[in-house]
Amino acid sequence: MTIDPNILIIRPDLMNSLPSTTHDGTDLTSELLMGMRLIGVEYRRIELAPPLGLSFGKAAGLAHFHFVGRGPVHLRCASGKTYRLDTGDAVLMPHGGEHEVVSALDVSPCLDVRELEATTLCPTVTSIERPGSDADAGKEALIFSGCMEFDLGGMQMLVASMPEVMLVATLLDRYPELRVMLEAMERESCTKRAGFAGVFSRLADVVAAFIVRAWVECGCGDATGWVQALRDPRLGKVILAMHRDPGKAWTVANLAEEMGSSRSVFAERFLEVTGMTPVRYLTELRMRLAAQWIGRDRESIESVAFRLGYGSLAAFSRAFKRTIGHPPGAIRGHGGMAHAHT
């Protein structure tokens, strides 16, 4: 069987490739998901009669989420790959990118979804509707489409290893409880009951977390170095310690103590698995967090430097520029990680 790295496939033989806990009982998957947030979510409720052809432009650093309340429709990616989405299917595209949603594969050209007239339902949800003829009654496609920054916090390096397309349809056998949530999303999207937009967006957050958890449990695709570290319970304990307390004055000696080994054995094992030294890993982790806190959360540069254990602003600024590529002040107002060179 050939595995396409661009789509999430749930394989039973990979379900246990990432251990669920470290020796001290830490739930590794929960640690990964606790920091996950969908930031700046903007949903569109789209109900259009066939022929339907919508294009979604590339937005730097933004992910897309689509849920089909009434289908089928087809997802057409810039790579040329297509995926059929039936009623109740959902898809997460962590890297965003240009793509199209069409009612049939021969539909062309497509309309830019950003140029269609929309009605505001609530601060984060708009509605796009185009009635068809009487012959089209009941045939309108219904799609909820979300655009957001996909944030895994300190685990952000994993996003780059995620596949192009992550389909819920591949998860239902593993997670039968997802079907209940998808059915609830379908009801909310079709009936438009009071408050449906807020209920739907919260359900979408949960479904996204399920998709990421399934990917983690399958071994995180090609994220080999970082996941290999987590597969080693002793090394995973060290990684999680750094992520939990990035501002601590970590040394190779006390990190080796966390692992329960000598400095030389720890340093050699860490470099072998992650491809970088512990000091470099900690610095890159701190700078990724700094970019988020300064650019996205609007924290002052001074407070971020203090939180991350730097005794002087100058030392922090040098480390930031060396790692990210520009001084910390340059990302203020630019959205943090979406514009950081990681």
Image: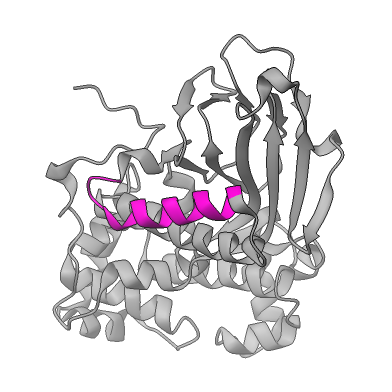
Q: Classify 331 as above or below 214.
A: below
Q: Residue at x 49, y 66 (%)?
A: 36
Q: How many circles with numbers are drawn on the protein?
A: 0
Q: Classify 225 as above or below 69.
A: below
Q: Residue at x 68, y 18 (%)?
A: 135
* Residue 109 falls left or right of residue 69: right
Q: Residue at x 46, y 25 (%)?
A: 83
Residue 254, position in %: x, y?
29, 86
Q: Report the front residue among 14 and 206.
A: 206
Whether residue 71 appears in this view of the structure is yes
Residue 175, position in %: x, y?
27, 53
The magenta-colored residue range is 172-190
Residue 66, position in %: x, y?
56, 42
Q: Classify 215 as above or below 238.
A: above
Q: How is the image coloured?
A: one colour
Q: Report the front residue among 56 and 78.
A: 56
Q: Residue 336, located in which quarter of the rendered image?
A: bottom right
Location of the N terminus by quadrant is: top left
Judged by its main secondary structure, the magenta piece is helix
Residue 227 among magenta residues: no
Whether residue 158 appears in this view of the structure is no
Q: Report the front residue among 66 and 248.
A: 66
Residue 185 among magenta residues: yes
Residue 80, position in %: x, y?
54, 17
Q: Classify 182 as above or below 136.
A: below
Q: Residue at x 70, y 47 (%)?
A: 44
Residue closest to the far front: 134
* Residue 297 falls left or right of residue 27: right
